[in-house]
Each structure stands twice: as C-alpha cells, then as structure tokens.
Image (cartoon, helix red, strand yellow):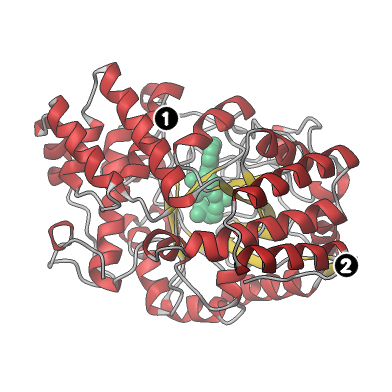
Amino acid sequence: MIFHPEILSIEDKPMKPFINPGEIRDLINKTSSSPERVRDVIAKSMDKQRLTMEETAILINAGDPELIAEIKEGARQLKEKVYGQRIVIFAPLYIGNLCTNNCIYCGFKADNLKVKRTTLSTTELEEQVKSLEDVGQKRLILVFGEHPKYNARFIADSTRTVYSIKSGPGEIRRVNINAAPFDIDGFRTIKEANIGTYQIFQETYHEETYRKVHQGGIKADYNWRLTALDRAMEAGIDDVGIGALFGLYDWRFEVLGLVRHTNHFEAVYNVGPHTISFPRIQNASDLHINKSYLVNDEEFTRLVAILRLAVPYTGLILTARESAAVRDEILQFGVSQIDGGTNIEMGSYSKRKAGELQDIDFEQFQINDNRSLDEIMVELINHGYIPSFCTACYRLGRTGEHFMEFSVPGFIKRYCQPNALMTMAEYLEDYAPAETKEKGYRLIREKLDEMAEDKSKVSLIDKLKQIKEGKRDIYL
Ligand code: SAM
Ligand code: SF4
C-alpha cells in the first residue's frame, strides 16, 4: 500500500460527489511557490511519491521560467526513470455519432443539424476493424455518442464483435471504451464483454461552467457524470480512465480536479485511475465557445509535466487532436500512450488513408496529426522510443499495469520492455515497409546490447527468433 494518508480524505464515500470548488480555488489563490518549495515537491515526486493537492498547487503556481524548466526536466527524468522509453500505441474507432446531449464544444451535439448521423452496421464494423488490423493495430478504443441505441448491451456486443474479427495475422487484443456513463448493472453488462479501460472525461470539474456548456440531455447532470466511474468500479471495472477537456475553464482548476478525482479513487477503492487524458478543445462543426480559457502550447506542456509529477504511476494519454509537432515535443514529459494512424470520421478507416483531408461536418472535432501508423512508428523509433502494442498485463489478469510498472522493482525490465520489443517485432514482420523494418530491428539490437548478459536476454533473443519464424502473440 503506497498511498500517503495525507492525500486521502476520510470523507470520501463511494458514489458521492467529492469536488469542493472553494478548496480548489483557495489552493490556487493562496499557495505560494518559492523556489525551495517547488524544488522540494519535484524531489518528492522523483522519489516516486504521489503529490498532495497542495503540492500540486505549488507546481501550478510556479511562474518563474527557470522553475518551470525544472518542473519539465523533473517530469522528463521521472518518465525515463519509471517508464523507460516505451510508448503504447492505439487507435480510436467511432461506432456511432447519434447523440441526445448538447455539449456546446462537440460537433456531434444534438442541435448540430449539419453533421451526418450514422451508426456502423455489423458489416461496416467488420470492414473498419479489418482495415485497422491490416495496418498493424492491436489496441482500439471504441467511441460512442450518448443515445438510447447505444445501451450497455449494444456496447458489449460491439466489443465482442471487434474481438472476433481476424484479418491475416491481425487481431485486436484490447478494446477500451469511451462512451456515456451507465448505472451499475449497465457497467456489469459491459464488463462481461472483457473490455480494457472504460474512459469517461468529466470535461470540466468546475460545476458552474459544466452547467453552462452542457445544455440538455443526461450529460447536463454534473454529479451523474462525476460519480460515473465509481459505478463502473462498483460493477467490477477497476480499470478506468479520467480526463478533462482543457479550454472550458481555468486549466489550473482542472489539473487540481483531476488530482482530486485520483485521490477519491485511492481513498474509496484503493486504486487510482489507469489513465488520465487531457484533450484540448479543437475546431469542430458548429463550434461556438467562450475562448477565454483556451490553453496555449506553453501552458499545455506545463500542465502535462505537472500531471506527470503529481500522479507518477498513472498512464498519460496524448491524442491526435494535437499536431505532430506538439506531440513530438510533449511526449518526453511523461506521456505513455498515443494514438497512431487516427481517422475519426465515421467509417473512414476503410475508405481513406491516414493523411488525407477530412471533412469537419462528418467528425466530432478536427484532428491535427494525420500521420499514418507507420509514419508514427518511424518517428518514435527515430527518437529512440519503443512503440509498444503490448496487452500482456490485461490478458494475464494483471490489472493496474502502470501501478505495477511504477511500484514493483524490476517489473519494467522483466516484463514491459521485452513485451514491447516483441510486439514491435511482430509489427516489423507483418506490416512494416522495408525501411521501417530496418530501423526497427536496429533499435531492437541497441536495446538488446544494453541488456545484462543473463537468462532474460537469452530468452528474449529466442522469442524474437520465434517471431521471425512466424510465431505470434508471445508475451511475458
Ligand atoms: N459521448 C461520450 C462522452 O461524451 O463521454 C463519448 C466520447 S466523446 C465522443 C469523447 C471526448 O471528446 C469527450 O469526452 C470530450 O472530452 C472530447 N471532445 C468533444 N468535443 C471536442 C472538441 N471540440 N475538441 C476536442 N475534444 C473534444
Ligand atoms: Fe454527445 Fe459526447 Fe459529443 Fe457530448 S461530447 S455531444 S455526449 S458525443
């Protein structure tokens, strides 16, 4: 048990709201950030300890460019120390864009009559999944609007269909979900389909703003949303992803909201969230929002670094909403997962290639990184990252993999890095063009050279040989 008693609140109860806006506001307004305090907090995090809300506020309020540079450097080192150079790759797949809600920032809002509404049929779903498998994807997140048609049974059935589709050596090994909140029974039905992570973003933790930007539909209920992942936990889904949509309200408030949400899970369920997402608002069809809280690139980099330091054992997800340049820059400050080869227009994976222009009236928002999966792989490899499609922990029932990576000494060396290299080798064998293959195997050789001459290395070399000979889906 590594959670620090000082970060937990004894008042937290399952399925009860836990955000106190006055407490967060006070932390932002009253916490001072002397250089000594900032450095102490960075040192605590580097020592792999979770930060309190107040300590997070100390980082948030550090305005001196030199201190900000130290925060970023701390996050970079922590990422390297804890997670090494692996980056997990996934792709989003939009199943249906019918929606009864009116989130003002979203192209799929009910009032937007310009958007073309569709739901993939089973045949269309098969086509999409095969197209994704044919480029090498192994991990998907299925995305749904909020609509009576997309009930728990529908989401469970879609998940089962995705797992059942194989194309050549391709298969989807992990299906995550980004969809509306359900009651406990609904979450149970979805869990039975063997999902990975269930993601629900609070969008904004600031209730007054929340009410302004959600004008109708079930999502307008702030507390139903806030307690959604508690119900998922009660239903046995202990792998949940939280997030805030940056640009709706003060980014400092949202960062503290995310940390408070993490504390709530730790206090009540003794396990933190699996991942944290931090999308920034992007252009969308019929978008009319107050622009005063939009987050610029400098603030964005800072907030990612602060999150890395505040919750060192949680996965951080950076999506193709951001441009290639922003993603390449921010990756180093603690991101552990990115999407690659992303197309979010409904049905687009089988129709168009990544990189082609998209039509904003057919998608939820505009994405800014249109690189193909292979281009992303090459970019990562060129920068010394190990792209990983690993799903071993989930399939072996080792939940909370980030937590184990973080807290079990030697876990990454023993399991994560070899598994990452093996899944990369599968990609190189089955899907990569010659140039990527050459670069990828060069990286594998470099990583093998760095390993101690012991039986783990011998075993990994043997498994890589088996992959070359055609064996698939080997993991530790
Ligand atoms: N409909 C479900 C929901 O609202 O939770 C599922 C996912 S929604 C399709 C995925 C996420 O996209 C939302 O939670 C929101 O944070 C984000 N999003 C919506 N509009 C956006 C925009 N204009 N720019 C960037 N992200 C946006
Ligand atoms: Fe619907 Fe989700 Fe878009 Fe809101 S964010 S309008 S719930 S699809």
Vertical relation: 418 (above or below) 258: below
**Residue 243, percent across and down?**
42, 49
Front-lying residue, 363 or 432? 432
Q: Could one spot residue 283 in this view of the protein?
A: no
Q: Residue furthest top?
A: 65
Circle 2 SS class: loop
Q: Could one spot residue 416 in this view of the protein?
A: yes
Residue 140 falls left or right of residue 276 = right
- Quadrant in which residue 244 is drawn: top left
**Residue 115, percent across and down?**
68, 41
**Which residue appears at 13% of the width and 58% of the height?**
6
For the C terminus, the image quarter is bottom right
Circle 1 SS class: helix
Residue linked to disc 1: 300
Q: Residues within 10 Å of mark 2 (few under 14, many from 20)?
A: few
- Quadrant in which residue 126 is drawn: bottom right
**Which residue appears at 52% of the width and 59% of the height?**
413
Dot 1 amino acid type: Phe
Q: CA distance from mark 2 to mark 1?
A: 43 Å
Dot 2 amino acid type: Gly
Q: What label sits on residue 328 in the rendered view?
A: none
Front-lying residue, 167 or 103? 167
- Quadrant in which residue 193 is drawn: bottom right
Residue 366 falls left or right of residue 136 = left
Residue linked to disc 2: 470
